[in-house]
Image (spheres, grey):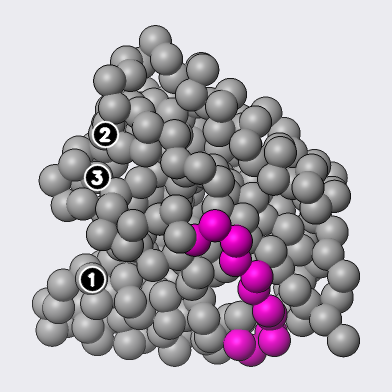
Amino acid sequence: MSLSTIACGTISLVLALFRLSQRYQIEMGRLWAKSLLWISRTKVEIHGIEKIDPNGSYVFVSNHLSYMDTPVVFSSIPVQFRFLAKKGLFQIPFLGWHLHTAGHIPVPREDPRSSLRTLSRAAELIQTHSISLLIFPEGGRTMDGELHDFKDGAAYLAIKAQAPLVPLALTGTREILPMGSATIRHGRVRLQVGDPIPAAGMTLHDRKRLTEAAREQVAAMLARKGRAGSLSPVK
């Protein structure tokens, strides 16, 4: 994982020096994600991808089981992604350079007012640059592998941007890279894409209802395949 991150981060830095567009930076990030899956021999099953327009703008919300969640989503859904990432990740060598040059957005979680300003700025980027954003609304990886309550930041963002909110359900990443482990194991991951929930015409007063609707879809998709973290390993 470290070698792949260093290699792609270095190439990303070179691209930045030549002032190439963020689109190239994003494609480098997608190459990094695919390389992690290839190195770990991770097989990804995708269901419902036909619901996504590659040229559309969305706010994606997913359950969060592992650090492998981001590479799985990034490599599997063909849109122009940006991420809301905790500020500390931008300070990691190579990875931080890529996050910055690719236009990903640092979130100062310790400052609620700054976080709200960050969400408003992200909504403007969705509208002006036709990008999509991925958020893990549980606020972090879950230690028990179960689906927890969603915070309403993603709904706030979708409403401000008037962009559809798309629920995602991940299964199997917890076995591949468990919390507290630095060892990536091979296995099988399932990514289910829910029905996009239109936010057009909604106001911020609707954010709780929108949050609950997204969580209900994620819970229903996970229930169809058992516990959030469990899939049979690849032989």
Q: Quadrant of the C terminus?
A: bottom right
The location of residue 73, given as percent across then percent down, is: 52, 63
The location of residue 224, given as percent across then percent down, is: 78, 47
The amino acid on which the numbered mark 1 sits, given as a three-letter code, is: Arg
Give the magenta-colored segment's residue range. 38-49
- Earlier in the chain: of badge 2 and badge 1, it is 1
Instruction: Check residue 54 for magenta coloring.
Output: no
When asked about the image quadrant of residue 230, the answer is: bottom right
Mark 2 is surrounded, within 10 Å at the Cα level, by few (under 14), some (14 to 19) or many (20 or more) other residues, namely many
Q: Kindly identify which numbered label has been placed on residue 155.
A: none
Left or right for 222, reference 135: right
The location of residue 161, given as percent across then percent down, is: 26, 34
The answer for how far apart the CA atoms under marks 2 and 1 are is: 21 Å
Q: Which residue is mark 2?
A: 161
Q: Which residue is mark 3?
A: 126
Instruction: Check residue 42 for magenta coloring.
Output: yes
The mark total stands at 3
The amino acid on which the numbered mark 2 sits, given as a three-letter code, is: Ala
Residue 188 vertical placement versus 103 (above, below): below
- Earlier in the chain: of badge 2 and badge 3, it is 3
Q: Quadrant of the N terminus?
A: bottom right
Name the residue nearer the viewer: 75 or 125.
Answer: 75
The answer for how far apart the CA atoms under marks 2 and 3 are is: 6 Å
| CB atoms of marks 2 and 3 within 8 Å | yes
Left or right for 15, reference 90: left
Q: Which residue is mark 1?
A: 23
